Amino acid sequence: MFEEEYDVIVVGGGHAGAEAAAGAANMGSKVLLVTMNLQTIGQMSCNPAMGGIAKGQIVREIDALGGYSGMVTDKSAIQFKMLNKSKGPAMWSPRAQNDRMRFAEEWRLALESTPNVDFYQEMVSALLIEGSKVVGVRTSLGMDVRAKAVVLTNGTFLNGLIHIGEKQFGGGRAGEKAATGITEQLTDLGFDSGRMKTGTPPRVDGRSLDYSKMIVQPGDAHPEKFSYLDTPVLTEQRDCFMSHTSKLVHDQLREGFDRSPMFNGRIKSLGPRYCPSIEDKINRFSDKDSHQLFVEPEGWNTVEVYVNGFSTSLPEEIQFRALSSVVGFENVKFLRPGYAIEYDYFPPTQLKHTLETKLVNNLYFAGQINGTTGYEEAASQGLMAGINAHLKISAKEPFILKRDEAYIGVLIDDLITKGTEEPYRMFTSRAEYRTLLRQDNADLRLTPKSHSIGLASDDRLRRMEEKEKKSDAFVRFFRNTSVSPENINPILKSVDSALVKQSDKMFKAFSRPNVTMGHMMQLDSVSDFVKENGLNREVMEQTEIQVKYSGYIQKEKNNADKLHRLENVKIPNNFDYSLLKSLSFEAREKLDAIRPVTISQASRISGVSPSDISVLLVFMGR
């Protein structure tokens, strides 16, 4: 039934497992993907969307490395938005609504077309351990399958417990049983484990909703995409909608608080801070009489609708009564109620930066088992675990991304050095080098690195180098080409910018606030350069960012270089942090308790901000 020995066994077929299997297989490992249900590979268990604030950057990074999430998203998208366009490019974040069924289908087809991947449907109940090394897995039917490395991506299935009001039952998600055995074995081996909680809103029948009473939320007029390869761009999009809760809705929800597992003590674990349930929101923000609800279609043709913002574990009749009082939902029909789920996780401080466990060699954890929440966070960990599992068994150097190289590097470094006691979600604010880690340049940052380890294809590298070459040439054009007052002043006047009296380089005029690439294209020499060199939108956007933000980008690079040089700077043993009044109170407290040995270590302590590190550096004359 199986190979005599696989290179890598991946346990779990969610976003982390799928990326881990694809990554290791594409690097040359023989992979077995074991999952409890082959029909749910790559399933979107919660919202039918990919990307968002910081998460969109992660999807672009996965794609730049040679992962599949970006391609699968593009092939199954029904709407695309670039979020935060009113802010600087470091904050721009792509997000796509997806057809849930097509998304899972595209993932399944992508994996099936990947050489070196075998599939098997069954629960893994135990790991095969010899000495301090994992050598395979044991299934619930008692079959042993051997491998050189194992990647665990169990999601919410480890001893999963679903809550709806006062009812509770075992399950990894709605309609699927929980996974047992692995937690108990790992704790016997010396691992620390904990419990976390997440939740999901009710799914409703779109035919029962009155969209005319809601606010339309269309996609971008000129939608982009995630992958740097030739994936389809949307030519047609489905609208989303927005409605709001009200004081009446909140009062009806409160009627069920005495039966809420969150408030009556049944659920003791922590849920996602930045994606709270509706009962948590009205409890924590009792001064607000209204909260936004985003009404998101689950696909092109299905009537199923996801009610984003109404995650709940209240009794089903309370859910129904309250949602029926929302504008546009007066005649709502439920397809299934919302629920909360508790599951086991393992504090990620027990891992190396490769995501290999410290206690058991060649055993890797990725995804929610590490305490994260979100498809994108899981997928990126899965890809990195798959890459490093392959490199480890091939006796090659590990692949570790630094904090100034990728959001993925920030994510893993945060988990390994700080740990997490609540579901970890990525935000742009977590990255101190976010001007460098933009969604538009993920390929320039990561594709050469991935190609050097044998994952990113030659085609990816060629495309990246062509984009970089054209963008660099366009930047040089602006630096070296002069423009006369009579040509540039009409543009400057149109944006209320000071006029010039003599010719100057285009770069200088382009760097001014409110002067865009669209304005510069009004100059014949610029439009001619674009046509002659066949520059596309992607190259033009990259060029505009390089010109307008060159000072900020260089400053951030210098800061990153300084911290790299200071990785070995020691902090005196008895350093008195109370002397530094400019440190935040939290930083003084944490630094005094943990007593970091180096500046680098101090910078990664939860609660110690980049500005706190700057205070330390100034005090130490650095």
Image (cartoon, helix red, strand yellow):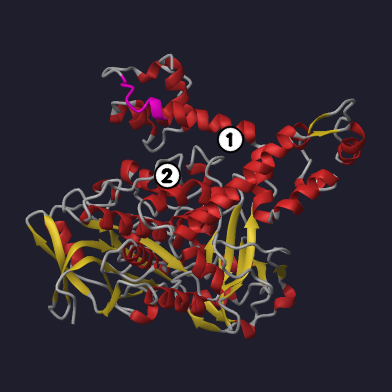
In the drawing, does residue 511 fall left or right of residue 263?
right
Other residues around mark 2 within 10 Å, as few (<14) / some (14–19) / many (≥20): many
Image point (46%, 52%), residue name = 447
Residue that badge 1 annotates: 553
| Local secondary structure at mark 2 | helix
How far apart marks 1 and 2 lie (CA) works out to 18 Å
The amino acid at mark 2 is Val
Residue that badge 2 annotates: 410
In x, y percent, where is residue 572?
29, 17
> Does the magenta segment cover residue 393?
no
Image point (19%, 56%), residue name = 362
Q: Is residue 350 above or below residue 295?
A: above
Q: Which SS does the magenta portion mostly show?
A: loop
The amino acid at mark 1 is Ile
Numbered range of the magenta stretch: 564-571
Q: Is residue 35 above or below residue 553?
A: below
In the drawing, does residue 613 fall left or right of residue 54?
left
Image point (65%, 54%), residue name = 538
| Residue 313 in view in this figure | yes
Q: In which quarter of the image is residue 320?
A: bottom right
| Local secondary structure at mark 1 | helix
Q: Specify the quadrant that holds the C terminus.
A: top left
In x, y percent, where is residue 35?
29, 75
The foreground one among 500 and 369 is 500
Q: In which quarter of the image is residue 491?
A: top right
Image point (55%, 53%), residue name = 53
| Residue 254 in view in this figure | no
